[in-house]
Amino acid sequence: MQFMLLFSRQGKLRLQKWYVPLADKEKKKITRELVQTVLARKPKMCSFLEWRDLKVVYKRYASLYFCCAIEDQDNELITLEIIHRYVELLDKYFGSVCELDIIFNFEKAYFILDEFLLGGEAQETSKKTVLKAIEQADLLQEPRHEYFNVPVY
Amino acid sequence: MSDVVEKTLSALPSLLSLDSQPGAGKLSSTSKLGNLIRGITELTSKHEEEKLIIKELASIKEQVASPNTTMRQMKEAMVRAIYCEMLGYQAPFSYIHAVKLAQQGSVLEKRVGYLAVSLFLNESDEFLLLLVNTVLKDLQSTSLMEVCMALTAVSQVFPRDMIPSVLPLVEEKLTHPKEIIRRKAVLALYKFYLIAPNQVQHIHSKFRKALCDKDPGVMTASLHIYLQLVKESPESYKDLTESFVTILRQVLAGKLPMDFNYHSVPAPWLQIQLLRILAHLGKEDQSTSEMMYDVLEESLRRAEMNHNITYAILYECVKSIYTVFPKAELLEKAAKCIGNFVQSPKINLKYLGLKALTYVVTQDANLALPHQMTIIECLDHSDIIIKRATLDLLFRITNAQNVAVIVEKMLAFLRLCTDEYCTVDLVGKVAELAEKYPFIKAKPGS
């Protein structure tokens, strides 16, 4: 995967994860143009786009658009399922997730994304394992000095 | 914008409850991040947003530069900096502090520090060199969380020249008792392989061990590397064909733990990776392909349900069948599958069907014949993407009889096309066709 963007129906960016090195200016340009292109799509249209020289897969969940750009040889349907799987993970973690959860806890959304999609590749780990890893870290709410180096598992 | 404000206001009571559940980690209403976000959502113009962010950035800058800021406050400031960067504003003064946060913070603060580093920096940044020491330290830590974080950070953004320094530590993690560490180590090595293949030449034997790992998660991770290796030089890995076939067979038979099922399909991503690897191994090689025919047939048969993920597997399976050495009955079954896709009322499947057809007509042009009517309908479809995919397909099946019509359709499409890349692509195709069939006269006025 090359990158994943999450944005609202007004085009406000909620999350962006880039798996390829690009200059900031380039990223902004791509984000702006792609967001506009996706927002212009009508609801009955295909979830796949050929935009510039990229393949883009997008899906709308309530008021959020999940948008991924993939390589040429990648399977579009599987990317749609990757998006769906990510949404399922978010749902399980936040308990019936809504856009607000992602807005206010975007760093948690990033952590979950990183556990699931490492370096742009989907890891086939069970849902349980991904969420357990995040929750273990969460349980360290108020780290006290004496607990620093104790193995947690 | 106002409905967001409404939602925010109605969500406030639950946000105010500081009774923290480890799962959701609700944000305290008085936190600076909460205020910032609320502030942004209330604004209506870009200009006001800019003003607010600039003010916020100045406050963050002051906070991170002050010697009195605790790590905890630094973590909070960092999250706000990430937010501002996400909205498109630069906060370069925070980069060095992100690295410091990853270095000096406690576990939670480290997590935010590493996240900030992976979001702000890219491979060529000089600050990354400072991160190397932190990563080295964390890789040797007795806390599993820290090792995990270091491995995650390494897989995302790491300077290529410093790979030799961390390589031995990452390598030794391959034999760690915990599955999650082994898995992350494999993925880190995969990333290293992508950016500096000669550095990891010597550990190919360890990848084989990862492939046979008793934990399916680690095994799947190793498949990413194998796909890359097999793509580059399939001959060296023909001996592994049997192993891959066996794994796929076991997956299809449901031998994996229940948790790997995705909507009652066993380990779909794993299946797809294996199908791709097998496709590369079996290409133009009859004996190797013979080893995989029955497992390919099995995959086709199993993926008969009505869910997107099974269609995804089917698509991959069809592609693999057409890449490996051909076998008549399999090709027939695959052709039927494609037929189902193209005829499907679901627009996504239609698109995939067209793409699959484009791929297979290079082998057998007659496959497109039974679907001619559907293809013609797709040409006039309201969705521009379907139109383009159809034109792509038509380009492949041009012959002396239909080339004039096809070129005409392409030119008509070009007139509507606004995307630069699309235009260039189509013009190239038209030029190619003109060269190939120089004696066909186009209709006047086109």
Image: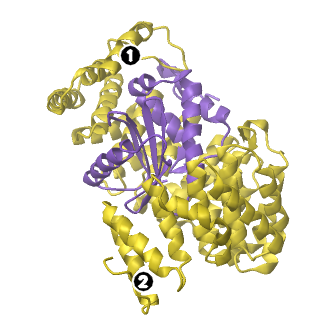
Chain colours: A purple, B yellow
Q: Is residue B319 visible?
A: yes
Q: Nearer the viewer, residue B380 or B113?
A: B380
Please state, as top left, top right, bottom left or bottom right, where the C terminus of chain B lies in the image: bottom left
Horizontal placement of A95 versus B205: left or right?
left
Q: Residue at x 43, y 37 (%)?
A: A65
Q: Position of residue A145 (x, y in %)?
A: 47, 21
Residues flagged by tags 2 and 1 on a common chain:
yes
Chain letter behind tag 2: B
Closer to the N terminus: mark 2 or mark 1? 1
Please state, as top left, top right, bottom left or bottom right, where the N terminus of chain B lies in the image: top left
Q: Residues within 10 Å of mark 2 (few under 14, many from 20)?
A: few
Q: Position of residue B341 (x, y in %)?
A: 65, 56
Q: Using the image, determine if residue B423 lies above or below residue B13.
A: below
Chain letter behind tag 1: B
> Alpha carbon of mark 2 to alpha carbon of mark 1: how far?
56 Å
Residue on which disc 1 sits: B7
Residue B160: which disc?
none
Q: Nearer the viewer, residue A32 or B429?
A: B429
